[in-house]
Amino acid sequence: MEVIAIHCDHCKEKYCTQKVSIFSGLTGEENAQVHHLIQRFSYQKGEHLIMDGQSFDRLMIVHSGQLKAYRDTVDGKQQILHIFGPGDFLGERTLFTHTEASYTVEALTSVTVCTIHRQAFQSLLGQYPSISKKILEVLSDRLSQLEKTVESMGAKTIDKRVSAVLVDFAEKFGRKQKNSIELDLPLNREGIANFIGLTRETVTRKMKRLEREGIIRPVGNKKIEILDYEALQESSE
């Protein structure tokens, strides 16, 4: 496996941290200081960025591509925990304390991530203590939102879970067209089933129903066209 590291000073897109909620409230000077700590790494589809139980010492910001975080279950299946896309971040706990990864992270596509090492970031906090307060506020909001999402998903019926995950993917990865939304699904049917705790057959039946109702149209194995986004939202609530 070859991983190429590029210091962020060579990137044409200055202050990519401004696109990420965890740093969005920083001043220009604070953002510039964070920017100088960043290194960029490139990974190919199928490569592992983090392994479950591995020592984890840096924040990762997804610059391009898609990642999945998962755990292996006792019966040999993957329990998919989260799908990350551009602008998402992971490993925020490592900015404040040493920790080990509680999941494996795999590249679903070719991926570039911007990373900040914990030791370098902690040194920065000594100079700009206000940064830690702003980050804690963002993390608190993120945790509250995650709790609401988990609670909502657990209360949804099987049909609504499938619609809800398609709405979520559309918001993160969809491309708006004149009368529809094109969506390259980050997971196949089996992956979606593992993600929302259903069987592949159940996911397939629900998507077939959405197709018959004229809400979605399959374009390929992992690509769909959402023809009626409002109807999809309604079916997820």
Image: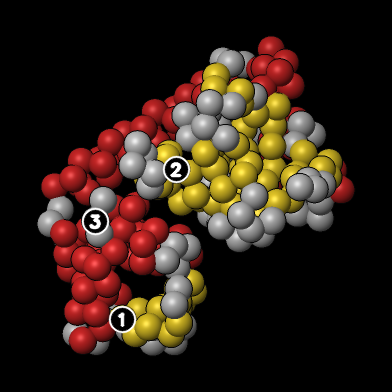
Residue 95 position by quadrant: top right
Viewport quadrant of the C terminus? bottom left
- Return the residue at label 1: 216
Which residue is at a point 21% across and 74% down the rendered structure image? Answer: 205
Which residue is at a point 53% across and 26% down the rendered structure image? Answer: 53
Q: From the viewer's perspective, is the residue at label 2 or at label 1 nearer?
A: 2
CA distance for labels 3 and 1: 20 Å
Residue 213 position by quadrant: bottom left
In the rendered image, residue 204, in percent from the top left (x then y), is placed at: 27, 72
In the image, what residue type sits under mark 2? Tyr
In the image, what residue type sits under mark 1? Ile
- Return the residue at label 3: 198
Q: Nearer the viewer, residue 151 or 193?
A: 193
Label for residue 70?
Answer: 2
Applied colour scheme: secondary structure
Determine crowd level at label 1: few under 14, some 14-19, many 20+ residues with C-alpha closer than 10 A.
Answer: many
Regarding residue 8, the answer to whether it shows in the image is no
CA distance for labels 3 and 2: 16 Å
Q: Say if 40 sits above or below 29 in the image.
A: below
In the rendered image, residue 55, in percent from the top left (x then y), is placed at: 61, 23
The outermost residue toward the top is 126
Q: Nearer the viewer, residue 201 or 38?
A: 201
On screen, residue 232 versus residue 169, left or right, reads left
Q: From the viewer's perspective, is the residue at label 3 or at label 1 nearer?
A: 3
Determine crowd level at label 2: few under 14, some 14-19, many 20+ residues with C-alpha closer than 10 A.
Answer: many
Does dot 2 land on a helix, a strand or a loop? Answer: strand
Q: Earlier in the sequence, mark 3 or mark 1?
A: 3
Q: Earlier in the sequence, mark 2 or mark 1?
A: 2
Which residue is at a point 42% across and 66% down the rendered structure image? Answer: 188
Does dot 3 land on a helix, a strand or a loop? Answer: loop
